[in-house]
Image (cartoon, rainbow, N blue to C red):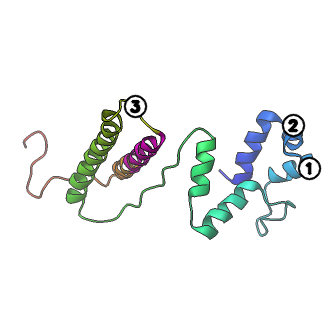
Amino acid sequence: MQSYEVLREAVEEVGAKALAAELRLSPALVYKWCQEPSRGDVDASGARNPLDRLADVIRLTGSVEVVNWLCHEAGGFFVSNPRITNEDLQTALLVNTQKLVHEFSELLLTVTRSVEDDGSIEPSEADRIRRSWERLKSSAEAFTVACEQGLYADCRPAGDGDATGS
């Protein structure tokens, strides 16, 4: 989906005029954000939309903190897409499975350490829990994407028979 299409759908929920009034912008500008740009010129609609501008900020700074902040504002979180490599998949399956278990154990350990001293979780401890949770989600996403892409389709050692024993 293109940025202007995402904006168009979002704007339809509240109306361009109402959104423009809340943002203290002209309705014409909001309508322009929701228009498909000309193929050769992304600025042809007369105004680059905020999503394209944010994408530029992320691309130019190399920082995803803007995305992290925006996801937090929307009540969610950001997990980047994993980079899947063509390493030995038998090893990768075992290593990635162990990594998932390790990350989950680290999360549990972080929570345990946070509550065992005083029975509560302080803001700094909550931050450590969040970082541990984010690492676990990233590992789980990488593992899931690899599974979806069929990278672990046949990870049996050479010479093993199939599951039926044939």
Q: Position of residue 146 (x, y in %)?
A: 35, 53
Residue 70 or 93: which is nearer the viewer?
70
For label 1, the residue is: 28
Magenta stretch: dominant SS? helix
Residue 78 or 125: which is nearer the viewer?
125
* Residue 45's disc number: none
Q: Position of residue 164 (x, y in %)?
A: 11, 39
Q: Seen in the image, is 159 located left or right of residue 29?
A: left
* Residue 120's disc number: 3
Q: Disc 1 or 3, which lies upstream in sequence? A: 1
Indicate the secondary structure of the residue bearing disc 1: helix
Closer mark to the observer between disc 2 and disc 3? 3
Q: CA distance from mark 2 to mark 1?
A: 12 Å
Q: Is residue 13 visible?
A: yes
| Image quadrant in which the C terminus is located | top left
Q: Amino acid at mark 2?
A: Ala
Residue depicted at 34% across the width and 50% down the height: 143
107 vs 46: above or below? above
Indicate the secondary structure of the residue bearing disc 3: loop
The span picked out in magenta is 123-138
Q: CA distance from mark 2 to mark 3?
A: 44 Å
For label 2, the residue is: 18
Closer mark to the observer between disc 2 and disc 1? 2
Q: Position of residue 4 (x, y in %)?
A: 74, 52
Q: Disc 2 or 1, which lies upstream in sequence? A: 2
